[in-house]
Amino acid sequence: EAQVTQNPRYLITVTGKKLTVTCSQNMNHEYMSWYRQDPGLGLRQIYYSMNVEVTDKGDVPEGYKVSRKEKRNFPLILESPSPNQTSLYFCASSLQGRGDTQYFGPGTRLTVL
Amino acid sequence: GENVEQHPSTLSVQEGDSAVIKCTYSDSASNYFPWYKQELGKRPQLIIDIRSNVGEKKDQRIAVTLNKTAKHFSLHITETQPEDSAVYFCAARGRGNEKLTFGTGTRLTIIP
């Protein structure tokens, strides 16, 4: 089944404790991205990757890192999480390019205390 | 960059009536306009999209219209049903196939 998966789905952590949220897709999509969703603000792009070893900042990259060592995986790294990073995070992929139809993962609800 | 505004932020409609959600965009070169539906606790999913070379597209009870001159596009849902209750997001693809910018969402509630 074609899908985007994320892990973990729920995470509660404390300020400053490094964490990684994994994202994987099995559709051979070139483009992957991370969004955060906050009430009243919609979906805001954090980082995106056009292909392996190619990443770039979205609208709200501060406090986040990403890597794209393999085509199927695109982990989101929070080196020193802070409470303002409490949010719902979605990974997405598309066949080509930022503007193509995005296929979203199930989401990761992160709480930073 | 592209700016997308979406209205209203909340909308309540009697079951069986129609619902309309409107979005405006700023980049006149934008050429792709998808709509996503997000049910409570679930991921956004594409429900319909339109490209700049057409003015209207329909899929059963859902239609999208595009007015390039006025730079706005709208989602129309007819004969609404309880399962249409969700948050709907519009988006626009800006110049040069750059990023997909989302609106802030509309929470649609269908009243039985």
Image (cartoon, coloured by chain):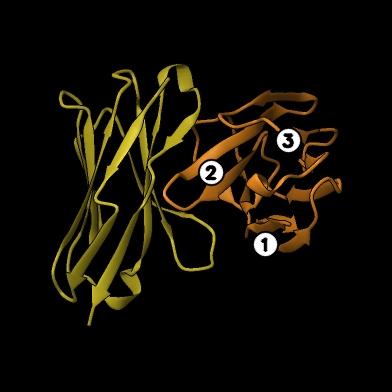
Chain colours: A orange, B yellow
State whether residue A81 is above or below residue A99: below
User: Which residue is the site of mark 1?
Assistant: A1
Quarter of the rendering containing residue A60: top right
- Left/right of residue A107 with respect to residue B82 in the rendered view: right
User: Which residue is the site of mark 3?
Assistant: A64
Do marks 3 and 1 share a subunit? yes
- Left/right of residue A100 with respect to residue A53 in the rendered view: left
Q: Amino acid at mark 2?
A: Gln
Quadrant in the picture for the N terminus of chain B: top left
Query: In this rendering, which labeled residue sits more in front, label 1 or label 2?
Result: 2
* Circle nearer the N terminus (2, 3): 3
Quarter of the rendering containing residue B67: top left
Label 1 chain ID: A
Do marks 2 and 3 share a subunit? yes
Residue B34 image offset from top left, x and y in percent:
38, 42
Q: Nearer the viewer, residue B93 or B107?
A: B107
